[in-house]
Every structure is written in C-alpha cells, then in structure tokens.
C-alpha cells in the first residue's frame, strides 16, 4: 500500500512568520512614503558616512561606528582568533561573498589576524569616514564581496590613544569569569601602529540527559552528563602600516593566542535492561592545550602610469594537544582507568601572492598574477585500552597500547594558482568583473599511510552589477568554488561526541569538493538612510560532496570517515531587512529581520536514498531590535530566532 501525506507545521509558528513579514512590509511602506532620495549615495553606488554621522551615539571604537549603519552587523572576532588554518577559503583573491572590511582601502595580510579584528582596536576619533562600497573595480584589494566597508582613517601627523574594555560573564552554575581587552593605537608621521591584548572567557557548563532504545523499541539505558570547560582565550596582536612615499607602502601584522580548554566530565549511566536497574559512574579528565600564531605582510608600489604591483605573504601555525583519560568510579570511592587517548595536531600554512594591476583602455582594468600555498599537517594519536592481553605501558595511562590505523601521519599540500581578472565599467550604472583562475595542487601523505595525488581545477567567475537607481542594485553572480580540505579528515582523530566510539577514522583518498554558485541579489537602500532591504536567491550544485562514509574494516569493527559521496544540490532564498523607526519618532531604534527558506538534496550511501545535507536546517526566522540612548551612552536590544526543521514536499511511505 502506498500513502502520500504532507507534514503540518504548527499554526502558531506560521502566524508568527506572517506577522513578522507584515510588520516589516508596513515599516518599509511607511518609510518609503516619507522621502524619495538619499543624499549619501554616490553615482558609483558607494555610500559615505562621515565621522559626524556617528557623533550622536558616542562610539568608542570603529566597530561601534560600523554597527550603527543599517544593514551592517559585524561581530568582534577577538574571542576566536585560533581558527584552523585548513578550514579557511581556498585562495585569497575572493572576498567570500559577504561583507569584507578594509582599512584605508587595504585588507590585512592575515587569516586569523584579519582586518575585521582590527575594528575593536581602532579608536573612533581616528576615523574620518566609512565607505560602503557595493560595486567592483581594479582599485579594490578584494573581489567577489557583496559589499565592502572601507574604514578611512584621519590624516594626522601625530596622534595616539588607549582604550580598554572590562567585562565579566556570569553563568547559571554561579561561576563568574572576568575578561577584557587593552588597545593602543598611534600615528607618528607615516607610521600607524595598533597593539591589542585581550582575555576572553569561554567557560562552559553543560548538563545533558540522553535516553536510548533498542531496535525493538525497548528501553536500553539513560545517560546523565555534566561537562565543565574552563577556557579563556588570551590574545596578543599588532598591526603596523608604513608609507615610504605617496606611491610605496607596506603593512605588517602578527598574532599569538593561547586557548587552552581543560575539561572535566561526570557521567551516570542507568542500565534499563537489568532488573533491578544497575548504575555505572564515570569521570573524565581532558587537559586540552591550544595555541596558534600568525605573521603576515604586504608591499605595494604604484607606478606613475597608475599601475600597481603588490606582494603578500602569510605564515601561521595552529597547535592542538589533548589527553583524554576516562575512569570508572565505584561505590566505595575507588577508580579504575578504562580509556587513554592522547592526540596532537600541528597545522602549518604558508601563502605567497603577487599581482600586477593595470588599465588597458578607458573603463577596462586588468589584474594578473599568481598565488602559491603550502599546508602541512603532522598528526599523532595514541590509544590505551584495558585489554586482557598485551603489556600495559605508563605512556598509555597504564593501559595496553592499541593499534589505530592511520594514527601517525604527515599530510602536505602544495598549491599553485595563476589568475587573470578583468574589470569593465560598462557605464555609470553597470559593471562586470570576469575572473579566470586555474588551480593545480599535489597532496602527499606519509607515515602510517602513504598516498600521493594531483588535482587541477578551472575556476571561472562572472560578477555583474546594475545600479537600477542609486538606491536599488541588482547583482548576478556565477562562479565555481573549490573548498579547502580540512586536513584533519585525512587522519584518525579522537571522537568526543560519541561515548561508544573512541576514534574516528581518516580517509587517505579524500578529494577537494567543489560547487557551482548561481546567485541573484537585489538590494534597496531606503531613503534618508533609514534602512536596507534585500532579497537573495542562490543555488549551489555540489560535486564530490563531503559527508561521512562507511570505513569499516570488518563486520565487528564498524567505523565511518569523511568522504566524497557524489553530487548534491542546495537552494536558498533569504529576505533581509534593517530599518530605523524614524517615521514613528524613534530614529535610534533599529529593527532587523530575516526570513530564510532552504532545501538540499544528496544521495546517502548508508541509507541508499536521497536526503538533505547533514546539520542543515530548512530555514529560519529572525527578528530583533537595538535601541541606542545617546544621552546615557548606552544601548540595549533583543533578538528572537527560530529554525524550520520540516520539509516542504509530499513524503511517500510504503
């Protein structure tokens, strides 16, 4: 028998969605009727906000200033500078599709220590103006972004300032963790200096309860767990900018961060299969060590002809070390270790990029150059188990060493990427950017496993922008994107999410996955700078899509690993709004809203059927506001969000 039916979404949630859309539409129509022009939008679709615009809010940093602009919401990255080097975008030429921050038209030569992180270090009195650039051009340091926020600094021969921030986080378990930052900025002649030191608490106390059932739906057990992570991120960073002459300049930046995350876990398992029920208590100690550093720099020279030569260099390292010891705790207070896992990963990355930009003829600009990168992972993993055979070792916590496939490995990738980028200013309202990029790389793995492979990709891009009016812009983007492989997926690692599994297998045959991005974006900036609304529809057609695959070596040794499973499709529609309530006499109240509808489909090799992507919700609703009170130099706000987890289609069951 075959039955079709549709899942019903709760009525109250649909009602909330309708109210949200109706409220936003009403606000927009009321604002549109109040004026017909916005005087800070230039002919090239660049919006300029002078320093005087922000005086009413008494900002302290450049981050405070940019977050007062409708449609902009930049989070401080001070608390997470240790991002894995292998997780970043592949290549430095692309802006990533979102909002990119520039300082005086330049992007910081860094991935962990990026330009966005500088916003909290720049004092507001050093900013002359902020430019929101929505077009493309050969003068820009970044390509492919929806919009660019350029922070233009004041030109002063001598200036310095010190700013500080003190905070404290209070948690539900009555734990208090202090934090803060200290920034020093100075300008002496042609030298600009930024130095920042910060301590950001990332303490976590999590309690969880889990109930499991067997295949016949009978109760198996319950697990109650308390996890405490005592973590604070300490960061020291600096950015230097020196102008040798009107035509020559250089920048240097450095960062060091420690992000240790020692964790303790207490777990109580109730076995419901036994009568009476039996209890099992466990304790875990995980003294995690995390640190990373990065240095970067770039040099630029402009010729009298207007051409530009630029070189950029980045080097970074991310070190992770973790020891997991699990103990059985008995009723008389004694303990017995039953698991020892020691892992360490060191990821190093070096990037060199050089380019030459020139004007061909009027309204045509050409940039060509090359980028090379080396990424290295050194990984080690030791596993000790309470086996009845074998010789216990103190290096394995007093347990018997157990063999883990692909545990001690070195992975190295060498990548080369020549590129050619053409910008055509068709007229005062239209621009077209075309990029031709060819990438070829070699990945070699040695140690417990040996493998060597070559890859090559052609990555074209077309970015067309049409300013229908100074306020309304239409953008069409088509590009091929190759994702940077997470090198940890090549090797065996610890599994901290599953108590029944000690390690996750690595995949020595992993390939870079890629997708075609088709994007249509319309953005309208409301009159009198009272807000921004946008609609974005895009599709990603994935190839060699990465998900978990079966890596079992036998029927009794089940395992999974990250692998390439084939093709997949993702479709998204985003509607965004950011509106000031000026019409209602509340110009210092900014309302933000988002409605996102998503769908995805990929063939699952385990289930042998089509399904959506892992960890991929069907959409979301967001609405919030921020109210600035200039007289008190304070602001407050509220944000509500919810996710859609149902699928808009008819489901069939047999």
Image (cartoon, rainbow, N blue to C red):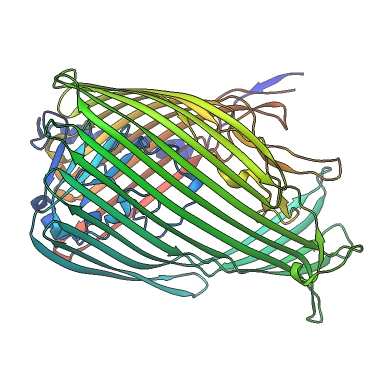
Residue 45's quadrant in the figure?
top left
In the figure, 591 relative to 157: above or below?
above
Quadrant location of the N terminus in the rendered image: top right
Whether residue 444 can be seen here:
yes
Q: Which residue is drawn at 66% across and 35% down?
A: 509
> Of 629 and 194, which appears nearest the observer?
194
Percent position (x, y) of residue 31?
17, 36
Total labels drawn: 0
Which residue: 16% across, 19% down?
A: 361
Q: Which residue is drawn at 61% across and 66% down?
A: 227
Q: In which quarter of the image is residue 226?
A: bottom right
Indicate left or right for 216 with 490 as reference. Answer: right
Q: Which residue lies furthest to the bottom in this view?
A: 332
Q: In this view, does 632 lie above or below 593?
A: below
Q: As rendered, which of 525 and 315 lies closer to the eye?
A: 315
Looking at this view, is 17 or 526 the one in front? Answer: 526
Could you tell whether 264 is left or right of 47 in the image?
right
Residue found at the far right of this picture: 389
Image coordinates for residue 495, horizontal then vertical, percent: 67, 53
Residue 531 x %, y %: 21, 39
Q: In which quarter of the image is residue 26?
A: top left
**In the image shown, does 280 or 430 lie closer to the viewer?**
430
Q: Is residue 140 visible?
A: no
Instruction: Give the left or right position of residue 249, taking residue 55 as reference.
Output: right
Q: Position of residue 636 (x, y in %)?
A: 28, 59
**Is residue 256 depicted above or below 593 in this figure?**
below
């Amino acid at each position: 028998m075959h039955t079709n039916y549709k899942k019903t979404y709760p009525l109250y949630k649909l009602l909330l969605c309708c109210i949200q859309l109706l409220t936003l539409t009403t606000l927009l129509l009321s604002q549109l009727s109040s004026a017909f022009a916005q005087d800070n939008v230039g002919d090239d679709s660049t919006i300029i906000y002078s320093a005087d615009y922000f005086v009413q809010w008494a900002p302290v940093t450049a981050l405070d200033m940019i977050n007062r602009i409708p449609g902009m919401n930049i989070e401080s990255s001070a608390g997470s500078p240790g991002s894995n080097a292998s997780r970043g975008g592949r290549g430095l030429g692309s802006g990533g599709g979102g909002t990119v921050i520039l300082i005086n038209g330049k992007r910081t030569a860094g991935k962990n220590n990026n330009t966005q992180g500088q916003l909290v270090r720049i004092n507001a009195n050093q900013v002359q103006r902020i430019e929101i650039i929505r077009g493309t051009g050969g003068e820009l340091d970044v390509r492919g972004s929806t919009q660019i926020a350029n922070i233009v600094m004041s030109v002063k021969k001598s200036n310095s300032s010190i700013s500080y921030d003190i905070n404290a986080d209070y948690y539900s378990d009555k734990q208090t963790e202090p934090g803060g930052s200290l920034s020093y900025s100075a300008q002496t002649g042609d030298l600009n200096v930024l130095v920042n030191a910060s301590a950001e608490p990332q303490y976590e106390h999590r309690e969880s309860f889990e109930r499991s059932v067997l295949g016949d739906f009978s109760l198996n057990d319950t697990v109650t767990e308390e996890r405490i992570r005592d973590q604070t991120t300490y960061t020291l960073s600096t950015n230097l900018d020196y102008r040798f002459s009107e035509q020559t300049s250089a920048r240097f930046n450095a960062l060091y961060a420690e992000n240790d995350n020692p964790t303790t876990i207490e777990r109580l398992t109730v076995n419901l299969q036994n009568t009476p029920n039996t209890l099992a208590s466990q304790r875990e100690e995980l003294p995690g060590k995390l640190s990373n550093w990065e240095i970067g720099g770039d040099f630029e020279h402009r010729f009298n002809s207007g051409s530009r030569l630029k070189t950029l260099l980045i080097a970074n390292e991310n070190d992770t070390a973790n020891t997991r010891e699990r103990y059985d705790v008995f009723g008389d207070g004694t303990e017995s270790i039953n698991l020892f896992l020691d892992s360490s990963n060191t990821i190093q990355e070096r990037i060199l990029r050089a380019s030459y930009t020139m004007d061909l003829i009027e309204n045509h600009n050409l940039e060509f150059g090359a980028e090379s990168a080396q990424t290295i992972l050194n990984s080690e993993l030791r596993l000790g188990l309470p086996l009845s055979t074998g010789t216990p070792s103190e290096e394995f916590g007093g347990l018997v060493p157990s063999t883990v496939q692909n545990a001690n490995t070195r992975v190295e990738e060498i990548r080369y990427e020549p590129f050619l980028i053409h910008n055509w200013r068709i007229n005062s309202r239209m621009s077209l950017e075309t990029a031709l990029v060819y990438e070829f790389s070699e990945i070699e793995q040695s140690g417990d496993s040996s493998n060597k492979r070559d890859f090559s990709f052609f990555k074209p891009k077309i970015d067309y922008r049409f300013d229908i009016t100074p306020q309304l812009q239409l953008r069409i983007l088509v590009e091929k994107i190759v994702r940077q492989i997470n090198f940890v997926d090549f090797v065996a690692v610890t599994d901290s999410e599953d108590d029944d599994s000690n390690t996750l297998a690595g995949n020595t045959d992993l390939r870079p996955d890629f997708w075609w991005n088709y994007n249509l974006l319309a953005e309208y900036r409301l009159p009198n700078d009272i807000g921004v609304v946008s609609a974005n529809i895009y599709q990603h057609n994935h190839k060699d899509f990465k998900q978990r695959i079966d890596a079992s070596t036998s029927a009794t040794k089940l395992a999974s690993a990250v692998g390439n499973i084939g093709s997949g499709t993702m479709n998204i529609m985003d509607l965004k709004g950011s509106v000031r309530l000026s019409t209602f006499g509340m110009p210092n109240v900014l309302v933000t809203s988002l409605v996102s509808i998503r769908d995805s489909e990929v063939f699952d090799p385990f289930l042998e059927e089509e399904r959506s992507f892992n960890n991929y919700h069907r959409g979301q609703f967001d609405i919030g506001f921020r109210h600035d009170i200039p007289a008190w130099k304070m602001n407050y706000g509220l944000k509500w969000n919810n996710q859609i987890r149902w699928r808009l289609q008819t489901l069939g069951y047999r």
